[in-house]
Image: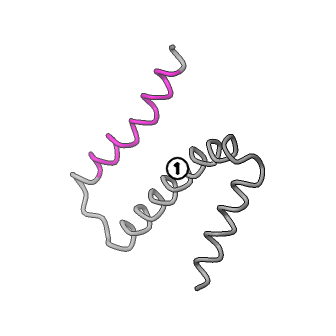
Amino acid sequence: MGTSLLFGVVASSALVIGALIGARLELPKRLLAILLSFAAGALITALTFELFEDAYQRGGKYGPRLGCWWVRWSSLR
């Protein structure tokens, strides 16, 4: 329980610190774009890891491979 609470506080502290910095400072647009793109990439990565486990449990080792192939093929069109 204590470890989970510690991880929750550390993970959510970035949100509070970021909000305080954003409210107090005027960041250059280029730096803001870099920070937001990094945050978006981190969220997409977290979502991918979360969904991949479920896809593996439901579809075995071929389910996720088929999904990755379909995404890659559809992006080429």
Q: Which residues are magenta?
A: 4-21
Q: Tell me: residue 76, above or below residue 60.
A: below
The residue at the point 51 percent across, 54 percent down is: 42
Residue depicted at x 70% and y 48%: 59
Please provide percent x and percent y for residue 35. Answer: 42, 61
Q: Secondary structure at mark 1?
A: helix
Mark 1 crowdedness (10 Å alpha carbons): few <14, some 14-19, many ≥20: few
Quadrant of the image occupied by residue 33: bottom left
What residue do we see at 76% from left, 55% from top? 62
Q: Nearer the viewer, residue 50 or 6?
A: 50
Say left or right for 45 vs 32.
Answer: right
| Residue that extends furthest to the top in the rendered view of this protein | 1
Identify the main secondary structure in magenta. helix
Residue identifier under label 1: 47
Q: Amino acid at mark 1?
A: Leu
Magenta-drawn stretch contains 42: no
Q: Position of residue 34 (x, y in %)?
A: 44, 67
Quadrant position of the C terminus in the picture: bottom right
Above or below, 32 relative to 48: below
Measured as percent of width and height from the top left, residue 38 is found at 48, 61
Question: For residue 11: magenta?
Answer: yes
